[in-house]
Amino acid sequence: MDNSLKAAFLLNQNWIAEKKAVVFGVFEGEEIPCGLGFKKETAEKEAETLFPIFLRIKKHFAHKDFSGKFGEVAVLYPDDTLYKRVILCGLGKKEELDLDKIRQVASAAIAAAEKLHVHKISFTLFGAPAQSAQERLRAIFEGAALSLYKFDAYKTKPKDEIIPKAVISEVEFLLPEIIPEEEIVQWQKNLDGYVVLAEAVYFARNLTNQPASVMTPRFFAETADALGKNYQNVAYTVFKKKELAEMGMNGVLAVGGGSDNEPHMVVLEYKSIVDDAPTVALVGKGVCFDSGGISIKPSDNMDEMKMDMAGAATVMAIVLTAAKLALPVNVVGIMPLVENLPGPKAYRPGDIIKSASGKTIEVLNTDAEGRIILADALHYAVSQFKPVHVIDLATLTGAAVVALGSHYAALLSNDNALAAMLSKSGETTGEKVWRLPLDEAYKKQIESDIADVKNIGDRGAGTITAGMFLKEFIGDHQSWAHIDIAGTAMLSEKFSYRPKGGSGFGVRLLVDFLERLAKPSQNTLFEELAQ
Ligand code: BES
Ligand code: ZN
Ligand code: ZN
C-alpha cells in the first residue's frame, strides 16, 4: 500500500516565473483577488504581470460570467502574461468564508485543473482577513492534497477518456512576498507536518477501501506490526483466538466465530518521551466485513460493509501519526478485528455472551455486532491502562446516517469538557461532530429480561441506545467519548475533498485533539470547562 501523496508540495515566493495554472480567489462583488501581499518595492513589477489578469477578471464580472459566488470556477487564458492559465475561484461573502470553505475552494480548483492539461498548479493564499496566512496555507493544502487521493490499486489500465485527466504532480503555494525570508524555514516545517497528516488520512482511506478478501483481521494485524516496527517508541501486541479466550474476550470471539478469518485484537502503544505525559486510549471498531451474520443484511449495498473497520483504520493512523509527530501525549490504540459472517460456528440471536467485564449480553440481532466487540475492547482500555480520556470510533449505527447524513459524526460523551474539546477540534478541522444526549432515560431501552443488557434498543434513538450500551462497559471512567462515524467514514458519493469510499474521517479530528491536549495552556476553553 502506497500512502504517500502523489504530488510534490512546494513553497515559492517567486511570482514572476512562468506558471502553468495559477489559482486566484475573489470575494463576491470584489473583482480584485485577495491574499497577494507584495512588498512595496516589487509591487510595480508584479503589477505588470498581474494587471492584464486583473483586467480580464473585471471583464468576467462586467459580462456577468463570474460574480465571485462561493463555488464558482472560471478558467482564463491571459496570453499577455507569464501565466498560461488562471483558475478563478469564487470565495462568496467575506464574512462567511471559513477554513472549511477554503478547503472546498482549493478542491474545486484541483477538480478544474485535472480537466485541463496541467501537471503543475500554483495557489495564491486566498482567505478572509480573520484567517492568518499560515491558516490559509494549511486549509488550501488540505483541500488540494485530500482531493488528489485516488484508490486505483486495482485498475489495470487507465480510463479511456476523450481528454484524459491530467495527473497533477506538483502543487506550489505562492507565499506573500511580505513574509520575511527567515520565516520560510518555519513555514516549510509546518508544511512538512501537514504532509504527514495528509498521508495519515491517505493511509486510513487505503485500509478502509481494501476489499474484505484482502483486509482480513490477520492482514490488518500484520500491517500494524510491520508499520509499528518503524518506530522505536511504538509497542505492538496482538491477541489471537487463544489469548482472547484466556482474557475472557467472549464478545470478540462470538462475533468473529462465523468466519474462517479468525478474530484478532491489536494494541499499538505510542509512548512519548515526555515523563508525565497523559495517556489517551483510542478504541476502533474493526469489523472487516459486516454481512449482519445470521441476522443477515439485505444484499443491496452490502459491499459497503467492507468499510466497517474504518474506526480501527483511523485509530491505527492516529497512533502512528502521534509517533511520527512525536506528540507529548501517550496514545494507546486498541483495535478488535473480526469478520461478521453467518455459518455453522456463527453466534445466533438469543445467545447470551459473558463479556470481558463480566456483564452478560443478550444477543437479539447479530447485526448489532460492533457494540459487542467494543464492549470487550473498552473494558480492556479502562482496566489495563490509566487513560485520562477514552475515545472510541465506530461505524456503529445506520441511525447515525439517518440523523446526520455525511457531514457530521455523532458524539456521545459522559464528560462535557471532553465533548467541548472534540467539538472545537471538529470546527477547526472540518471533521465536525454533533453531540447527542446520553440520558439515563434511554437506559430502559437496552434492559434485557434475562441478561444484564441486550444488544439492540427498543424502537427509536438507535445511535443513543448504542452509546448507552457502550457506557455499560467503561466502568466508572469519567471521561469517555463515543464517535459514531457510520455516515462520515464511508461515503457513497464524493463531497468536495472527501472522495467516494473511505474518507479517513477522524484522523485530522483526533490529531488536532491530541495536539490541543498537549498544549493545555492555550486551551482556555478546556480549562474553563474542566473547572
Ligand atoms: N455496521 C453497521 C452500521 C452501519 C450502517 C454503518 C450503515 C454504516 C452504514 C452496524 O453493525 C449495524 O448493522 N447496525 C445496525 C444495528 C441494529 C441491528 C440495531 C443498524 O444500524 O441497522
Ligand atoms: Zn452490523
Ligand atoms: Zn457493523
Image (cartoon, grey):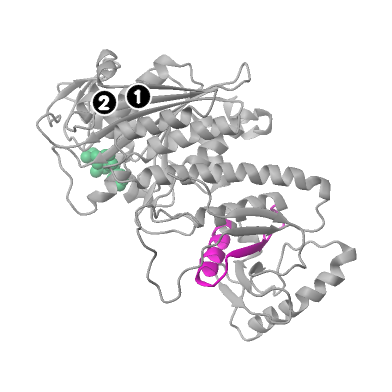
Considering only vertical position in the picture, is 53 above or below 263? below
Q: Residue at x 32, y 50 (%)?
A: 402
Q: Nearer the viewer, residue 410 or 302?
A: 302
Of callouts 1 and 2, the N-terminal one: 2
Residue 80 picture quarter: bottom right
Q: Which three-letter amino acid code belongs to the residue tagged 2?
A: Val
Considering only vertical position in the picture, is 253 above or below 457? above
List the residue tagged with mark 1. 377
Q: Which three-letter amino acid code belongs to the residue tagged 1?
A: Ala
Residue 519 picture quarter: top right
Q: Bounds of the magenta span?
A: 103-132
Q: Residue at x 76, y 58 (%)?
A: 13
Numbered tag placed on residue 252 in the rendering: 2
**Residue ranking furthest to the right:** 41
Left or right, 377 with respect to 14, comes to: left
Q: How dense is the environment of label 1, judged by Cα within 10 Å: few (below 14), some, or many (20 and up)? A: many
The kind of secondary structure element at disc 1 is helix
The kind of secondary structure element at disc 2 is helix
Please state the horizontal and vertical placement of residue 187, each as a whole percent of the image. Answer: 72, 46
* Total numbered badges shown on the rendered structure: 2
Q: Are marks 1 and 2 in contact (CB under 8 Å)?
A: yes
Please state the horizontal and vertical placement of residue 302, each as a whole percent of the image. Answer: 23, 49
Q: Nearer the viewer, residue 470 or 343?
A: 343
**Residue ranking furthest to the front:** 156
Please state the horizontal and vertical placement of residue 71, each as a whole percent of the image. Answer: 54, 68
